[in-house]
Amino acid sequence: MRLTEILRLVWLNLVQNKSKVILTSIGIVAGSATIMMVLAIGRGGQMEVAEQFKNLNAGAIDIVYDAENAAGSGSSDTMSGGMGRPGGGMMPGPPGRGMMGGGFPGFGADSRINAEAVSLSESDMEDIEVFVPGIADTTISFSVNADVEGGNLDESESCTIAGVKENYAQMSNLELSIGEFLAQENEEGKEKVCVLGADVAKDIFGSAYDAYDNTVYIDSRPYTVLGVIGEMGTVASGISPDTAIFIPYATGIKYLTGTNVSPTITVIAEDVDNVPAIMGYIEDVLLESYPNTEFTLSDAGTKMEAASRSNETLQLLLIAMAAIVFLIGGIGIMNVLFVSVKERTNEIGILKAIGCSRGDILTEFLLEAACISLVGAVLGVLLGLGITPVIESFSVRVELSGAGMALSLLFGVLTGSIFGFYPAYKASRMIPVEALNQE
């Protein structure tokens, strides 16, 4: 029998049993949509992680005094006597200098603490810079919430105010859409100047252009806007530069916090591979100044790895779910084909009696199974496209791709073909005389 004749038989059988085809393909529909969503959500998660950490250098290390950890039990991320480097004592000689690395120095939701608590300072930053080898750059920063007025605001709003050094923008890969970032002279003069995040500029002034060289009032004091940062997105520390107002570190200490502040020191390692050793050196330096005091050290590389592992785990769970759905869909196709073979026993006997070979019968039933799964796979892709907005409404990033759709179709067809093989094989092995006598 020619292939065209086999295809015509397949077409006639599918058209005459439309409802059976649709019902049989339901499992493939679900599996196809699931595999498509698995790939889209996995790709979206990878892009989300990449965007969250785009401002982080893998060699960035944040150091902060954690009053709660100091008061209670320590954690694995907290120094409690130092990791200990061979030989102990202070580090020999000044650190080497390398190229400036990009990193997003972390700062908490509010850095104000009690006056009697331990507080890191610029002198601690300088000690680390001098005595710890292998450091490319260091900075110190803090953040507090303060009332902000001005521009188009009808009443004051609470905003995140970040006190930073002039090298903060370069270490964080911050790009300005207009104006310039804080300079050393602003720090030295404790000037009341600021740089706005993209969202803050829009909220207060309507646009970055209107915000530039304008005035905002922070704690009722006027600050001149030197520039506006381009839109950056959320970062891993939970603080977005889009929603922050940056002022000189010394200005913030003088007008906002006084000495009642717990800042974060951020260090950029020249070599990512040396981060663990550098963290040990930093602990040694701090223990010299603050015996029996606990500081929390966290590196960006570990955060990146943890976020990537979480995304991979989610993707594996979704893949397992897709495999189970496909298995159920394949078993459904197998069962329906077994019933179909039983119902069409006489037809098979007639085909064999007029000269159809076992290969022709096998091909016919395999093509039917493949076509049923293809219909299910196409419907699954359409279902995936339809539910994408629903999934995105739950703040899940979905990145659809042509490759994902093609793979979803391929998996659907393969599932039907694999599970449809055995029923097709059984049909091809029927003895013509017995098939014709079957009622």
Image: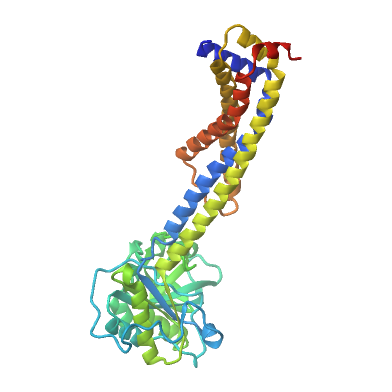
Q: Position of residue 97 (x, y in %)?
A: 23, 74
Q: Position of residue 428 (x, y in %)?
A: 60, 19
**Most foreground residue, 369 or 409:** 369
- Tell me if 399 is positioned left or right of 191 in this view: right
Q: Please indicate, yes or no, whether residue 350 appears anywhere in the rendered image.
A: yes
Q: What colour scheme does the image use?
A: rainbow
Q: Quadrant of residue 106?
A: bottom left
**Most foreground residue, 227 or 314:** 314
**Most foreground residue, 208 or 188:** 188
- Tell me if 196 is positioned left or right of 410 in this view: left
Q: Residue at x 34, y 76 (%)?
A: 277
Q: Residue at x 45, y 38 (%)?
A: 403
Q: Is residue 437 above or below residue 236?
A: above
User: Most extreme residue toward the right, as rendered?
Assistant: 439
Q: Quadrant of residue 248?
A: bottom left
- Tell me if 15 is positioned left or right of 192 in this view: right
Q: Is residue 195 above or below residue 393?
A: below
User: Most extreme residue toward the top, as rendered?
Assistant: 354
Total numbered labels placed on residues in the image: 0
Q: Residue at x 55, y 20 (%)?
A: 363
Q: Position of residue 338 (x, y in %)?
A: 68, 26
Q: Position of residue 146 (x, y in %)?
A: 51, 77
**Most foreground residue, 223 or 316:** 316
Q: Quadrant of the C terminus?
A: top right
Q: Please indicate, yes or no, whether residue 196 appears anywhere in the rendered image.
A: no
